[in-house]
Every structure is written in structure tokens, then in C-alpha cells.
Image (cartoon, rainbow, N blue to C red):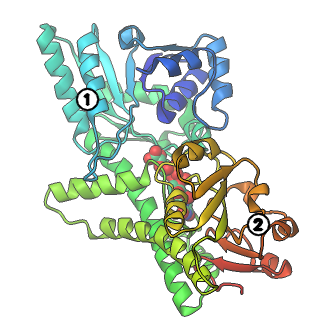
Amino acid sequence: MNVCIVGTGYVGLVTAACLAETGNHVFCVDINDGIIQRLKTGDVHIFEPGLEELVQRNLAEERLVFTTSLKDAMASATLIFSCVGTPSMEDGSCDLSAVYRVAGQVGDNMEDHKIVVNKSTVPVGTAARVREIISERLAARGVSLDFDVVSNPEFLKEGDAVSDFMKPDRIIIGTDNPEVAQLMENLYEPYARSRDKLILMSPKSAEMTKYAANCMLAAKISFINEIANICEKVGADVRDVRAGIGSDHRIGYHFIYPGVGYGGSCFPKDVRALIHTAADLGYVPEVLSAVDNVNNRQRQMVARKVQSFFESAGGVSGRVLAVWGLSFKANTDDIRHSPAIDIVNELSRAGMQIRAFDPGAGQNAKQMFAGNDNVSVGDKQYEILDGAHALAVLTDWHQFRTPDFPGIEKRLKQPVIFDARNLYSTDLIVRHNFTCIRTGRPDII
Ligand code: UGA
């Protein structure tokens, strides 16, 4: 099938490369000429395991074409996937200007029947609005053409995006047209492997499904963070509590790790967008607001713990804190809405000197902290520890899980770790004689 993908961000590019991999001809378009020129040479601008290899192979086999011309990219395509960004506005609502701009351009350039597929996370009713915009543009040209608008939200996790696309838990297809549903099912057949994974529904339900999924996952994280905070007060260990509740298959073990709260470009934005949608319609969403509030508080609580520790040990100002992990989670260079970044900012405002290291997000973090004399980002995981008063581990990268404890001890002024993600067992900490401040678990002093 010939497919046009609009947007070469992480959703667009992963979709393009994965659809090309199963034999489709994919025309990928972006307004950013710099990115398109790089992609034409197989140079992938985003950090996503396995993606560059897929892009290079499909470029070489001429199933993947990059261009800045939407007109050219959509000319022979049956399907046009809209994969543009939908950032948060100041009030928490979703900025749909890119989605609507693409819809307008599609209407301006449509010459035959097209199926416009929305993959971006968009508020309920956006597919209907996209349909109106395309119709208006066609009418302005005096053209009468039939077309379809489908909602097909993506469920990719950064860092696992290629495997999530290739082996999805489900594929949501939101359309009221049975012929289009059939065509979408054919497109996704190589990935679905079982018909049960293809779930058909209306465009509105598909749009709502995406928000409900992300909000449910965000709620799990805020819930376990709240339980962790209560564990600290009562002297329980949230690791045991997690094991205890997870054994009930209705609850499960997944996605209930407490820590610094959720970050990234999806959960914070999507929870706020659904709150906004509900409020606009006169419904006050109590649970979602609590999910958001607990998440904002969690990162402050981690910063507060570091400050309290140093306050009771003579003062915070001028203390040097080494930080491992700045990305919002492991295996990504993404620092958008990263709790670690907020924690570093909070502590630097309190007068601490921060020396940070991140295996993937170092470059992005260097740009973000440029001009902040209290924060430096180093390239060597162990060098940044030299002479620091403590180490805070804020992101769950694999390489932080089994560190060289004697090496850390030699470099730090005192053997103190703030293990905000609970990466280290009590045994390990006790064996190496460290003081360890943890999340939802008794501290080891
Ligand atoms: C999330 C969803 O998991 C995807 O299904 C969805 O497609 C995507 O958003 C999206 O809407 O595009 P992502 O933002 O890449 O994916 O990250 P996750 O792996 O879900 O992690 C989100 C945050 O929750 C991270 O900050 C992570 O550290 C945190 N987290 C996750 C916890 O604090 N505890 C956990 O148990 C799990």
C-alpha cells in the first residue's frame, strides 16, 4: 500500500519505518528541511533503539522516501497519517494548530479519495473537526471529493517504540466506515498476528481510549507514589507492599513502581488535557486532578528529602550533589517534563551545586542548563562524583542498577545515596556501608 506520513517526530518516524518494513511504500513529509535532509542520508535525529537501522534498510530498498512537499508525498497515497505534535497550552488544553494545519493542507492538495488517519493524541471530537476543515478547503477549491477520517491512536513507549509497533498489545481503529475498517485491518495484519488485537470503534471512542489508557497508567503511578509516601510515615516498605498487592492478578506487578513521579511528553500533558476537556463540559474530574497533584508533589518531595538531609547536617547552601539520570525515564534522551530536571532546578535554587550525568540525555541537558552556574552536566558517570557530598539517582537507567559501590565511596566525600527510584537492595547498601535515603522504604542510616 502507498502511505503518506506527516511528521517525522518519534511517532511519525517509527510508524513510517515500521510500515515500510512490511513492504508498504511510505512517503514521509516534514516542514523541517534540515531534518528531512538528514533523514535522506539515513541519519536519524531522534534517539530510539532499532530505529536508525530500520530507516537505513528501508531507504536503501526504496520503500521509504523523505520530502518536504506534502503535495508530492500524498499524491499516490491511499492513507495519510497525521503524526504531528499536540503540545500543552498554558491552561492544560491541547494545542491543535499543527493537526488543523495538516488537515487544511490535505484539503488543498487532495485530488482523489484519501483516508486521513490521525495518530496524534487529540481531544475527543478532533476527527470530526478535521473532517470539517478538509471539506471547507475542498469547497473553497470548488472540488467535490469523498474522503474518510480515521482515529488510530498510537501506544508507543519511548525507548521501546519499534517493538511496541511491531508487537502491539492492541490496535485501535476508530471509523464508522466498514470498508475503511477492512483496509486498516489489512494494513495492520502483519503486526496484529491475531484478530483480537484489532479493536474497532467509533472515532470518538478511539480518541477517548488513548486518553483513558494514559490516564489509567498515570493513576497507577500516582497511586503507588501516594502509598509509598504513607509507607514512609508508618514505617512500612513499599517494595514488599508492591509485591503483596501485585500478586492479585486484578492489580498486577506492572507499572506500580514508586519514584519521582511520571514525566515525558505524554502522561503530564494527557492527564491535564482530559481534565480540561471534562471541565469544559461541566464535569469536575476528581481522580484525574488528584493524579496530577500527587505527581507534581512527588518531585518536590524528593527535592525536599535531599534538603532536609543536609539541613540536619549543617546546611544546604554550597553542598555539592552528584546526580545520575536526567531523562524522564531510562533509554531515552528526552528530558521533557522530566522530574529529574525539576528536582535539579529546585536544589540549585536552594543553593546546591549540582553535577549531573545521563547516558542519553547529556547533550539536551547541557543546553537546558546553559547559563545556570549551579548546574554542570558531565560526560563521565564516575568523574562527576569526585568531591561531591552525596549522590542522587533519579532515572532508572540499567547502568545505574549495579554500580561500583567501592568506586562511588572513594570519590564521594561521604557515602550517601538518595535512591529515589529504589534501585538498590537493602543488602547491597548495608554490605557497602552506605547511608541511603529511599522512596517508601525505611532509610538506611
Ligand atoms: C507513555 C505510554 O506508556 C505509552 O503507552 C503511550 O503510547 C505514550 O505514553 C504516548 O502517549 O505517546 P512514555 O511516555 O514513553 O509512554 O513513557 P512510559 O514508559 O509510559 O513512562 C512514563 C513515566 O512514568 C516515566 O517518567 C516513568 O519513569 C514513569 N513510571 C513508569 C514510574 O514512575 N513508575 C512506573 O511503574 C512506570
Question: Residue 74: percent from the left, percent from the top?
Answer: 38, 13
Q: Name the residue under label 2.
A: 387
Residue 214 figure quarter: bottom left
Circle 1 packing at 10 Å, graded few (<14), some (14-19), many (20+), is: some
Residue placed most toward the observer, 273 or 395: 395
Real-space CA distance between mark 2 and mark 1, rounded to the nearest whole angstrom:
53 Å
**Residue depicted at 60% across the width and 36% down the height:** 162
Question: Residue 324: percent from the left, percent from the top?
Answer: 67, 59
Question: Residue 443: percent from the left, percent from the top?
Answer: 66, 84
Q: Which amino acid, mark 2?
A: Gly
Name of the residue lying farthest toward the bottom? 234
Residue placed most toward the observer, 359 or 157: 359
**Residue depicted at 33% across the width and 22% down the height:** 115
Q: Which amino acid, mark 1?
A: Tyr
The reply, left or right, for residue 113 in relation to residue 353 is left
Label 1 sits on a secondary structure element that is helix
Precedes in sequence: disc 2 or disc 1: 1
Tag 2–tag 1 contact (CB < 8 Å): no
Numbered tag placed on residue 418 in the rendering: none
Label 2 sits on a secondary structure element that is loop
Q: Does residue 120 show up?
A: yes
The reply, left or right, for residue 405 in relation to residue 168 is right
Residue placed most toward the observer, 206 or 156: 156
Q: Name the residue under label 1.
A: 100
Which mark is nearer the camera, 2 or 1? 2
**Residue depicted at 62% across the width and 40% down the height:** 163
Question: Residue 60: percent from the left, percent from the top?
Answer: 66, 12
The reply, left or right, for residue 214 in relation to residue 124 is right
